[in-house]
């Protein structure tokens, strides 16, 4: 059984003049939310074997906030998590997931699109919450009956969807 944790980066500040979107840091509430989500993941035993993270500054800082509270496993960084679509996210999951658990720290709309696409079924409350959008620091927990290398559209079960407002 494979478990996929899809996390949208925490809230970032606005870009300063001359700053690329890629380089936007977290704001104070984003840093606090990342730490809270890390603590929530630890308390629920949501511990990934591997984390794949966007190279964007706000994603890396989200990872730092989580890692201060819980184990994030081995970490790999990919520029494509910033620049590509949900299909690319799924390819990275298949290529890196194996039979354990994988945390993806990425961006919207890709994170939301992927969570909706792979969750064929799920907890009614989690599905209802996800249908209202995927806020910053939102975490979708999707279980698969087999290896993540075989993850596909509609084959996952949305077990939980946590948002900072829930913590």
Image: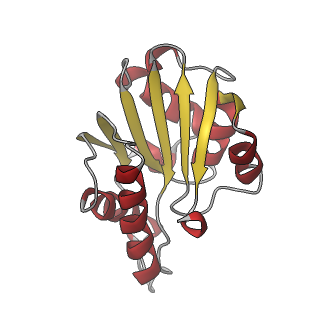
Q: How many marks?
A: 0
Image coordinates for residue 75, horizontal then vertical, percent: 25, 42
Decide: is 48 above or below 145. below
Residue 79 seen in the figure = yes
When asked about the image quadrant of residue 165, the answer is bottom right
Figure colour scheme: secondary structure
In the picture shown, does residue 87 fall above or below 56? above
Give coordinates of residue 7: x percent, y percent.
49, 50
Query: As drawn, is 50 to the left or to the right of 54?
Result: left
Residue at image location 25% in from the left, 48% down from the top? 71
Q: Residue at x 38, y 30 (%)?
A: 101
Horizontal side, residue 49 vs residue 16: left or right: left
The N terminus appears in which quarter of the rendering?
Answer: top left
Q: Which sits in the foreground, 113 or 72?
A: 72
The outermost residue toward the bottom is 17
Q: Nearer the viewer, residue 41 or 21?
A: 41
Question: What is the x, y in percent for residue 135?
Answer: 62, 62
Residue 25 visible at all:
no
Farthest residue, direction front: 43
**In the rendered image, the vertical position of residue 139 relative to residue 61, given as above or below:** above
Residue at 29 percent of width and 33 percent of height: 49
Residue located 71% across and 56% down the image? 133
Provide residue 25's location: percent of width, then percent of height: 38, 74
């Amino acid at each position: 059984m494979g478990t996929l944790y899809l996390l949208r980066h925490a809230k970032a500040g606005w870009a300063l003049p001359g700053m690329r979107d890629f380089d936007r840091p977290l704001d104070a509430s984003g840093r606090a939310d990342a730490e809270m989500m890390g603590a929530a993941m630890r308390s629920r035993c949501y511990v990934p074997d591997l984390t794949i993270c966007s190279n964007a500054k706000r994603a890396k800082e989200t990872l730092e906030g989580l890692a201060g509270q819980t184990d994030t496993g081995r970490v790999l960084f990919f520029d494509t998590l910033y620049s590509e679509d949900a299909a690319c996210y799924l390819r990275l999951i298949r290529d890196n997931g194996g039979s354990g658990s994988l945390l993806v720290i990425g961006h919207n709309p890709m994170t939301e699109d992927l969570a909706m696409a792979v969750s064929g079924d799920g907890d009614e409350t989690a599905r209802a919450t996800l249908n209202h959008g995927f806020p910053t620091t939102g975490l979708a927990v999707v279980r698969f009956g087999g290896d993540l290398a075989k993850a596909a559209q509609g084959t996952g079960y949305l077990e939980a969807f946590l948002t900072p407002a829930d913590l």
